[in-house]
Amino acid sequence: MSDLSGDHPVSDKRSRRRAELIAFFVLAFGIWPLVAVAIVGGYGFLVWMFQIIYGPPGPLGH
């Protein structure tokens, strides 16, 4: 009997490699840059709000 399941090791390797490359490019050039910008922007926003509430850094009394 022949195997009719459609398993082809070469095509499976190619499709898996293609899927991994697509996932890599989506992460490397899509998601991670957005996460980095969000983290830096969030930190800047926190510092800005802190300075609005407590005033800018520097010596007190003048």
Image (tube, rainbow, N blue to C red):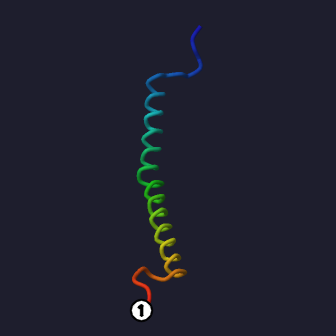
Q: Residue furthest front?
A: 61
The residue at 45%/82% (across/down) is 56
x, y percentage for residue 55? 49, 83
Q: Determine which residue is flagged by label 1.
A: 62
Mark 1: secondary structure: loop
Q: State which quarter of the image contains the N terminus.
A: top right
Q: State which quarter of the image contains the C terminus.
A: bottom left
Within 10 Å of disc 1 (Cα), the crowding (few <14, some 14-19, many 20+) is few
Q: Is residue 28 above or below residue 61?
A: above
Q: Amino acid at mark 1?
A: His
The residue at 41%/53% (across/down) is 29
Q: Is residue 35 above or below residue 44?
A: above
Which of 45/50 is in front?
50
x, y percentage for residue 42? 50, 67
Which of 25/52 is in front?
52
The residue at 47%/33% (across/down) is 16
| Marker count (numbered) | 1
